[in-house]
Image (cartoon, rainbow, N blue to C red):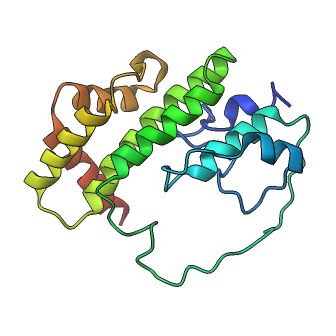
Amino acid sequence: MLSEVLPYMIWDKRQPFCRGIFNPAAWNKIYKRSILLSHYCTDERIRMGEDNAYIFECLYYSNSLCILDDVLYNYYQENAKSITSSYDAGRFRNNRLLVDYLVARLGGKEAWLDDELNAFKAYWLFMAIFHEARAGSGFRSGCKHIKREIEANRSADDIDCSRLPKAAALYLGLIRSGFFSLALGAAKLAVKIKG
């Protein structure tokens, strides 16, 4: 399983950036109780993405995998403005906690896994910027927020550009060079085009 599935679990390099072969949500996976108890996310400060934190770790430590084309549990999302769509000013901090947690648990184990984790760090940084792009705040305040949060959380410090696709490396270069207005502007344009 390691060679066929795991090197593609976070980012399948045959797909666009950070589209893995696994949806990191928990709703379609069953693990042995012992695996779950050993590898569940213990950092309660992570409010979003905690399923990523333990799903990828559980996959890494599993001996076998069976994929079912079925939903194993459902949840009811009563409020359309739930955590998935509402603005969260603490998203950069949350995402930093998430990537640090995964790197602490899985980093240094395999070269391919370090590549996956590097892409994961970039992905969650970019998603925080896109989250800001969808927010109703003004452009200037959005740029200031991005700058403040990226610097405070060291969000771009430990991502290796050479291990990212060119477009992602270029976007990260904008961020690292302090062109937060260009990074946010590009994200706002992408959000507008995507609809």
Q: Position of residue 88 (x, y in %)?
A: 33, 60
Front-lying residue, 30 or 134: 30
- Write down the quadrant of residue 180 in the picture: top left
Front-lying residue, 43 or 133: 43
Residue 6 visible (yes or no): yes
Q: Does residue 26 sit above or below 40 in this rendering?
A: below
In the image, is 194 to the left or to the right of 73?
A: left
Q: Position of residue 93 (x, y in %)?
A: 36, 44
Residue 120 visible (yes or no): no
In the image, is 127 to the left or to the right of 49?
A: left
Q: Does residue 84 sit above or below 8 in this rendering?
A: below
Q: Residue furthest bottom?
A: 78
Which residue is painted at 69% across and 47% down in the image? 22
Q: Where is residue 184 in the image (x, y as percent from the top left)?
A: 21, 47
Which residue is painted at 39% across and 32% down in the image? 168
Which residue is painted at 43% across and 34% down in the image? 122
Q: Does residue 5 sit above or below 162 in this rendering?
A: below
In the image, is 50 to the left or to the right of 178?
A: right
Q: Which residue lies furthest to the left in this view?
A: 140
Q: Quadrant of the N terminus?
A: top right
Q: Where is residue 103 in the image (x, y as percent from the top left)?
A: 56, 28
Q: Quadrant of the C terminus?
A: bottom left
Number of numbered discs present?
Answer: 0
Front-lying residue, 23 or 96: 96
